């Protein structure tokens, strides 16, 4: 993810912090400092936010570690000012597994709540019964309890992108098809986002507007991603692969890649081994090429900048599987290799996206045929 940095790696999963979250902590620190509360107070405020986010990280690890049990890897966990996002490499096979992965996050917060209750409950009544009631939220364990209760309630809203949305979709998917189920759960999410946004405007709370934006974008993205995936169901790679393409060899200089890029043939190039007839070793992407050039040497061999984790596809592989692998590896292109090991073509995110647009246009055309739909 752009604008984020890895701050730790836990159980093999990179934990990243988004620039907006770092800015948020600094903003909290500076506003409490300039509010005349002193350095210790400002540090305490920033520390409180970090403690709250530790609960968010634990929530995300609830998803990630449950997903791992079902053989689904987590690419990374990123912290944003309004929560965390665990990016799973793919959706699990069974709807029941998706439900358990979704519920594991809030379950972690339920455990934290249960652990805090014996500390907070006995003291809470004394705090409230004091002649001048003490505001319990000012007390750290009570604040932590409150935050975790809110995390559970918020995430159980049955709409995308909240965890409850996944549960809702899985329940709908047992009766409807997956795309329709996603559209409904995402539609509810967009509706809730509008309500949050309206509430934020009426009550003048920017935080609520923030949440509304987050929910709206998340719901829209999920719906679009699932729709795109659905277009490829049952389509073999041969239907979508590019057959007219250029390749590079591992020992070619980067300057040759620059020439081909500027000729406008393509953005990503399959890289073959150094000897004639060698199978592809990976992909040289445009961004990797530009990065290598920025380091200053055009005489370096192409092999040095080649991504080797992209794998290959077979012409009879299903496009949905290849697309899922591309999402998992982050590669924008995959070489297609025949039974004899020779390269036949390549699949790129760009031409897959074009195929999706063409098929959507054809579907729309069918709906508009005379007498079958609105004009
Ligand atoms: Zn969650």
Image (cartoon, rainbow, N blue to C red):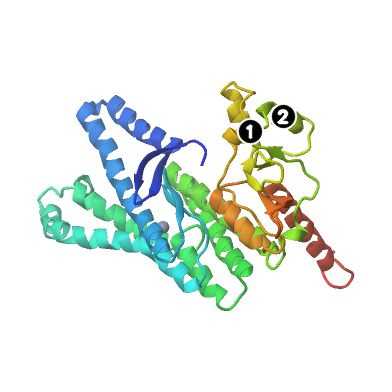
Q: Residue furthest right?
A: 370
In the drawing, does residue 169 fall left or right of residue 101?
Answer: right
Q: Earlier in the sequence, mark 2 or mark 1?
A: 2
Say what secondary structure mark 1 lies in: helix
Task: Determine the image quadrant of residue 176.
Answer: bottom right
Q: Tell me where residue 57 appears, x and y as whole percent.
A: 35, 50
Question: In this orientation, does residue 115 appear?
Answer: yes
Classed neighbour count for the residue bearing mark 2: other residues with Cα under 10 Å, few (<14), some (14–19), many (≥20): some
Q: Are circles 2 and 1 on residues that touch, CB within 8 Å? A: yes
Which mark, by number, is residue 360?
none
In the drawing, does residue 256 fall left or right of residue 290?
Answer: right
In the drawing, does residue 68 fall left or right of residue 137?
Answer: right
Q: Quadrant of the C terminus?
A: bottom right
Say what secondary structure mark 2 lies in: helix
Residue situated in front as seen by the camera: 30 or 90? 90
The residue labelled by disc 2 is 256
Q: Residue furthest bottom?
A: 175
The residue labelled by disc 1 is 302
Q: Is residue 373 above or below residue 131?
A: below
């Amino acid at each position: 993810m752009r604008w984020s940095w890895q701050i730790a790696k836990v159980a093999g999963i990179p934990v990243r912090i988004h620039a907006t979250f770092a800015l948020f902590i600094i903003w909290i620190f500076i506003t409490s400092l300039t509010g005349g509360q002193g350095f210790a107070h400002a540090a305490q405020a920033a520390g409180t936010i970090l403690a709250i986010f530790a609960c968010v990280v634990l929530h995300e690890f609830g998803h990630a570690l449950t997903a791992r049990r079902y053989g689904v890897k987590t690419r990374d966990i990123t912290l944003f000012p309004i929560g965390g996002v665990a990016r799973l490499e793919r959706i699990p096979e069974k709807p029941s597994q998706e439900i358990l992965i979704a519920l594991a996050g809030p379950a972690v917060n339920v455990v934290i709540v249960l652990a805090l209750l014996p500390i907070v409950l006995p003291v809470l009544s004394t705090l409230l019964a004091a002649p001048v009631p003490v505001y319990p939220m000012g007390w750290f364990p009570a604040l932590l309890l409150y935050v975790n209760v809110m995390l559970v309630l918020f995430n159980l809203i049955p709409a995308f992108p909240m965890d409850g949305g996944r549960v809702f979709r899985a329940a709908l998917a047992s009766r409807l098809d997956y795309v329709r189920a996603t559209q409904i759960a995402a539609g509810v999410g967009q509706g809730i986002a509008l309500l949050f946004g309206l509430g934020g405007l009426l009550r003048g709370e920017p935080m609520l507007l923030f949440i509304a934006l987050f929910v709206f974008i998340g719901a829209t993205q999920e719906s679009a991603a699932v729709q795109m995936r659905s277009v490829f169901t049952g389509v073999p790679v041969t239907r979508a692969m590019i057959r007219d393409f250029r390749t590079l060899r591992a020992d070619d200089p980067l300057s040759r890649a620059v020439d081909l890029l500027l000729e406008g043939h393509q953005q990503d190039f399959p890289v073959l081994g150094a000897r004639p007839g060698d199978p592809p070793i990976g992909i040289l992407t445009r961004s990797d090429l530009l990065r290598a050039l920025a380091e200053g040497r055009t005489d370096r061999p192409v092999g040095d900048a080649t991504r080797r984790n992209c794998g290959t596809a077979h012409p009879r592989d299903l496009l949905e599987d290849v697309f899922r692998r591309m999402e998992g590896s982050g590669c924008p292109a995959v070489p297609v290799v025949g039974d004899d090991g020779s390269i036949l073509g390549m699949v790129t995110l760009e031409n897959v996206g074009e195929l999706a647009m063409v098929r959507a246009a054809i579907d729309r055309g069918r709906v508009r045929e005379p007498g079958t739909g609105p004009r």
